[in-house]
């Protein structure tokens, strides 16, 4: 999707009107009617096709632009398949349960909010899903906070900050894969480059939660004891189960590409599962890799955490990515995004202005539409050419996309994540928003990096 390939040359006012109409269609569908994003995006695509036909473009040309837009996401889609299998195989082998078990044993009343943040960060990093972490472990922590009369708003802020740190930095995360593939950056290069803003945000957030934590010497929670007992009784808690985690970590540090790294994690987990589970057959393994792992421990929260994964679980993300990228292809082909970008091109003369424009666009898409994936896809495709023109490596853009897209969505009361988190945690978005420190800090640190050039990487001349 290149700007110069656009079939229409539109005045900026017309492009803005069309874009606002499309965003309104999608936003009303998602926010007001509470639809899954797929149908509103499909309605947006049909509207764009009709607009293009009115402008004289043939359906065959526009269909080709849909396909070309979707083709740019095939790399992410293959990674999604492997991520789905990795999650289910890591649960079957005991990798994720073992990490959870030792994480839960860290809990005490001292520095409660900081520990909540750390454990949610660890589990989010392991499973790569902020919403799953928040809706399961997060609910348990909210219950603990209520029992001990701790602030629910601060607890929710700690849960969300940790969950979205894990989502942002995990190789299992669909948003990390999407951001890297949108601009053509190897996944682990993208994750490593995010450390420039993520580590300062993490440290500041941890310190804030430490100082905000209530003064208590010990906390003993019956629900947590039940989880620990169920983990021991129904999953494989063992040091051997950590081998897949160590292998993936080691290969990531050596910058081995995502698919062979994820495949190694899957096959090593399958081998350990066969060794530790005598009744684990080849048929059961195939079902687990496709449909996900199912845990029946009797502890509802734990079962919901560990009954997940598999290729099938990634179909929602895969279908949404295909639709969103296809719509992005149309927006470029019809000249809508090129027209708007051309109008501001002359003003994007410095890296600071360029990064600011990217951050504002990412936050703006979150506010206007409330959809996390589009807040990565649209700014990524819009500014990709400008970053290359200014000599910036694509990983500089992919980092800014995550800083202004992935972690901002839970701060929007009508956003997909904001609505979901309010429902599962029982704390309104406006209540927890001031305490979601990690999510607030990331876009500001990205803006700072744009003007200081710290963490930005330029092509060698």
Image: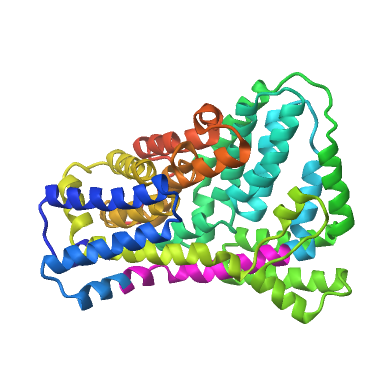
Q: Could you tell me which quadrant the N terminus lies in?
A: bottom left
Write down the region rendered in magenta: 67-90
The question of residue 81 being in magenta is answered with yes
Q: Can you say whether 310 is above or below 147 in the image?
A: below
Is residue 292 left or right of 442 when viewed as pictured?
A: right
Q: Residue furthest top?
A: 215
Q: x and y percent of residue 153 in the render?
A: 60, 27
Which residue appears at 66% of the width and 21% of the height? 211
Q: x and y percent of residue 432 in the render?
A: 55, 30
Q: Could you tell me which quadrant the C terminus lies in?
A: bottom left
Q: Can residue 125 be seen in this view?
A: yes
Dominant secondary structure of the residues highlighted in magenta in the image: helix
Q: Can you say whether 71 is above or below 95 in the image?
A: below
In the image, 413 versus 171, the foreground residue is: 413
Quarter holding residue 63: bottom left
In the image, 54 versus 259, the foreground residue is: 54
The question of residue 200 being in magenta is answered with no
Quarter holding residue 219: top right
Q: Can you say whether 435 is above or below 316 in the image?
A: above
In the image, 5 versus 347, the foreground residue is: 5
Q: x and y percent of residue 281 in the render?
A: 81, 79
Is residue 181 left or right of 134 when viewed as pictured?
A: left
Which residue appears at 70% of the width and 44% of the height? 137
In the image, 460 versus 131, the foreground residue is: 131
């Amino acid at each position: 999707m290149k700007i110069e390939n656009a079939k229409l040359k539109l005045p900026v006012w017309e492009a803005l009107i069309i874009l606002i109409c499309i965003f309104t269609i999608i936003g009303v569908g998602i926010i007001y009617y509470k639809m899954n994003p797929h149908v509103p995006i499909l309605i947006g695509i049909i509207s764009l096709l009709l607009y293009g036909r009115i402008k004289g473009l043939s359906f065959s040309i526009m269909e080709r632009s849909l396909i070309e837009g979707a083709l740019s996401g095939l790399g992410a889609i293959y990674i999604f398949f492997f991520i789905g299998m990795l999650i289910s195989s890591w649960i079957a082998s005991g990798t994720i349960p073992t990490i959870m078990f030792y994480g839960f044993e860290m809990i005490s009343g001292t520095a409660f909010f900081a520990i909540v943040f750390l454990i949610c960060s660890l589990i989010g990093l392991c499973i790569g899903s902020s919403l799953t972490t928040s809706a399961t472990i997060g609910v348990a922590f909210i219950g603990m906070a209520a029992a001990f009369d701790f602030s629910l708003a601060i607890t929710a802020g700690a849960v969300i900050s940790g969950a979205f740190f894990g989502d942002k930095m995990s190789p299992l995360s669909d948003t990390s894969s999407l951001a890297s593939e949108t601009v053509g950056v190897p996944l682990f290069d993208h994750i490593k480059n995010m450390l420039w803003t993520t580590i300062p945000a993490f440290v500041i957030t941890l310190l804030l939660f430490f100082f905000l934590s209530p003064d208590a010497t010990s906390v003993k929670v019956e629900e947590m004891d039940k989880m620990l007992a169920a983990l021991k009784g129904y999953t494989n808690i063992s040091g051997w189960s950590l081998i897949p985690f160590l292998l993936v970590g080691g290969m990531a540090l050596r910058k081995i590409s995502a698919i062979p790294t994820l495949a190694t994690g899957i096959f090593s987990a399958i081998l350990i599962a066969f060794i530790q589970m005598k009744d684990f057959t080849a048929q059961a393994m195939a079902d687990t890799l496709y449909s996900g792992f199912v845990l029946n421990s009797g502890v509802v929260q734990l079962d919901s955490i560990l009954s997940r994964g598999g290729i099938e679980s990634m179909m929602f993300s895969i279908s949404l990515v295909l639709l969103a990228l296809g719509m992005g292809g149309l927006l470029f082909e019809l000249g809508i995004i090129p027209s708007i970008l051309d109008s501001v091109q002359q003003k994007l003369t410095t890296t600071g202005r360029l990064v600011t424009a990217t951050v504002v666009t990412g936050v703006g898409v979150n506010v206007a539409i409330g959809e996390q994936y589009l807040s990565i896809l649209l700014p990524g495709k819009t500014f990709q050419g400008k970053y290359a023109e200014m000599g910036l490596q694509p990983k500089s853009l992919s980092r800014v996309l995550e800083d202004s897209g992935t972690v901002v969505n839970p701060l929007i009361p009508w956003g997909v994540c904001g609505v979901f988190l309010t429902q599962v945690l029982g704390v309104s978005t406006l209540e927890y928003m001031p305490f979601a420190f990690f999510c607030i800090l990331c876009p500001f640190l990205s803006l700072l990096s744009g003007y200081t050039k710290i963490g930005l990487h330029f092509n060698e001349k």
